Structure formats: C-alpha cells, structure tokens
Amino acid sequence: MTATEINATDLILGIETSCDETAAAIVEDGHVVRSNVVHSQIELHKRWRGVVPEVASRSHTERILPIVDQALTDAALTPDDLTAIAVTQRPGMVGCLLVGLAAAKALSFRFAKPIVGVDHVQAHVHTGFLADPDMPLPALALVASGGHTAIYLVRARGDTERLGTTRDDAAGEALDKGANLLGLTYPGGPAIENAAKGGNPRAFDLPRTLLGRDSLDFSFSGLKTALLYTLKPQGDRAPMPTPTGDTLRDLACAYQEATVDVLVTKLRRAAERHPVKALCIGGGVARNQRLRERLQDDRVLGTLRLVLPPMEFCADNGAMIASLGSHLYRTGQIAPLELDAVATAQAGGKIDARRRRR
C-alpha cells in the first residue's frame, strides 16, 4: 500500500502493553483522541517496588480485551469502523509485548484491518504532535521515564536522531531508588515530588553528573549513591535511618532538584547546539511539575515553543501509539502478521516499522 492509496481520514486503534500499563485508545487523523483507556498495575507491583515481568504479562492477558472493548465503546465505534490497528512492538518486556501483539493480530485477522508496529520510545518522542499538531520543526524531544532517558532531534514526523541517552540509570529509575532510600512509597517520582513540597533544594549538596562539557548523555547513578551516603556515611554500621519531618522534605527537594537540573542543563546544551524551534517532553518524569516550571523559566528553553502534553499522554498510553501509528499507516508502513516483539529500542533515524528479512 502506498501513501497515495490511503484515505485522508483515519481511525487508528492503539494498543500498549510494553510494561505495567494495559492501554488502548482510538485516535482520529493522528491527533483527535476519541478514547483513551489505561489500567495501571502500580498497586499490583507495590510490594516489590518495581515491575515483575511475569506478573505484568499475566495482568495484561486478563485485561487487554476488556480495555480494547472499553476504548471502542467510549469512542462509539465498532472494529469495522477502524482504519488500522497500531501496537507497541518494541522496546519493552517481551512477555508483555507479546500480549498486545497477540490481541492486535487477532483483531487484524478477524476484522481484516491492517496492522502497524510502533516503537514505544518513538511514540513518546512524537507525543508533541499529539498535543500540538502544528508544533514547529525542527524540535527537541525529551523522553524521561523509568526505563528511558534520552534527547532526540525531531526533523519531521518519523525522522528523528538520538542526541544523548543515559549511561546507567534512567531518571525515573533514579527517582524510584531515591524514594526507596528515603522510605517513601512506590512509584518514586510522584512520592518524591509530594514529599519535596516546601523543602529547601539547597539544604543538601547533591551532585549533578554532567559528564563532558559537550556531552548530551545522562548519568544518575552517582546521585543515587550520594543520597545513600548522605543518609548513611561510609563505614557507619548503624541501621539505615529513615528521615522524617524537615529533613525528609529537604532531602526529597534536593534530590528532585538535582535530577531536574541535569535534565534541563542537557536540554539547554542541545538547544544551543541545534537551531530548534520547539521542545516537547514525554515519559512519566515529564509529569513532574518542577521540571515543567524549570523549562518555562530557563533563559534558553523558555524562548522555544514548549509542548508540555497533558499528564495522561506522558505516562504510557494507547493514544501516543495510535498517533504515531497514524503516520506510519499513512506512509505505507504496514506490518505482516508475523510481526515480532523486540526488547530494544530504535536509536532514531527514518522510522520504518515494517519487518525486514534477516
């Protein structure tokens, strides 16, 4: 199928099961969200303070079809009304990805609808187009979540270049681990943000690992270690203390500020190096209010068109999968039913979701 054979209007069902959200959405013409249904497994995984792949995939299996049904009902559509089905193919936990792929393939076969494989990280990169279809280009995109932290240069829909990525912990992972050290609940990002309210970000001197002067890569492992040694100095054999009151508030605030500092500094470096017109953010960490404030107040980044998507489009969701799926469908990137699950992400470049022969 070529781009010239594709209708001007499309209704895409997006299915997302890469980690611990079971999600489905229907998006019209790439940006009009007709429905967006998400089931989070946070309560299921709280006891382990992290996602257990086998538990996550079983939950997806139980919930995926009811959630697809709900997405269709909310949009007042039937499967026959759909133009195509977009599904997260990569990256993620393979067992989780396979659940979404199986559902998408079954619907594709039963209702004779084309299927499109979507890269989950690229869907976050393209969330700017979902929130602001007229986002000027070129643009920067920050993807910051529990599994990924990277900066992309977006030249056009489907044409991206990864400028920097994390060398160790992702920002969201660092927040989760920091919250655990502070005795806060899971997930760590929202817990630290809530605990940090009213705190003094300069009460504790925590490091900002910026790597080389020109580096756009990230590193958060040193920040986590510094928090550990702030709580329990090396050689101290006493049990790990659990901070409370002003100490907890200031530690959470300082830890959050250090994380945000690194993200903002790297984005500023990228904006100074590349003549971009806009900046969009995606991933769970993009919901952090302090990050959003700092972007708006920054002397360089604040001059760009800031595309700060609604909160429901930052965490994993089906709408972002359907939105990018619309572009892939319109450019003829239809996948076969043999579409595979892949654990790793694409680095960028021209996105081509079709399965290549090995």
Image: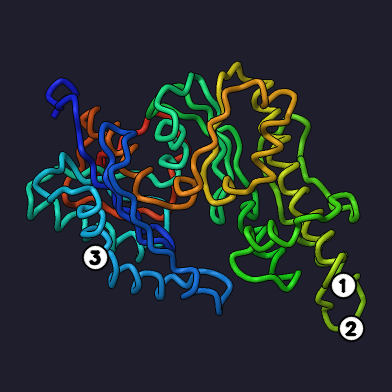
The residue tagged with tag 1: helix, strand or loop?
Answer: loop
First of labels 1, 2 by sequence position: 1
* Position of 294 relative to 8 (above/below): below
Q: Give me the C-alpha separation between circle 2 and circle 3.
A: 50 Å
Q: Nearer the viewer, residue 36 or 214?
A: 36
Q: Give me the C-alpha separation between circle 3 and circle 1.
A: 47 Å
Q: Position of residue 265 (x, y in %)?
A: 73, 35
Residue type at mark 1 is Lys
Q: Nearer the viewer, residue 29 or 89?
A: 29
First of labels 3, 1 by sequence position: 3
> Circle 3: is it few (<14), some (14-19), or many (20+) Cα within 10 Å?
few
Residue matched to label 2: 238
> Circle 1: is it few (<14), some (14-19), or many (20+) Cα within 10 Å?
some
Residue type at mark 2 is Ala
Residue in the picture at 38% in, 63% down: 39
Residue in the picture at 65% in, 46% down: 289
Relative side of 212 to 1, left or right: right
Which mark is on residue 66? 3
Q: Position of residue 221 (x, y in %)?
A: 72, 56
Q: Position of residue 270 (x, y in %)?
A: 65, 27
Residue depth check, mark 2 versus mark 3: number of the one nearer the observer = 3
- Residue 358 appearing in the image: no
* Position of 273 relative to 10 (above/below): above
- Residue 354 appearing in the image: yes
The residue tagged with tag 2: helix, strand or loop?
Answer: loop
Residue matched to label 1: 232
Q: Position of residue 263 (x, y in %)?
A: 68, 41
Residue 37: quadrant of the picture: bottom left
Tell me, yes or no, whether the two marked residues, 1 and 2, touch with CB atoms within 8 Å: yes
Q: Give me the C-alpha separation between circle 1 and circle 2.
A: 8 Å
Relative side of 181 to 344, left or right: right
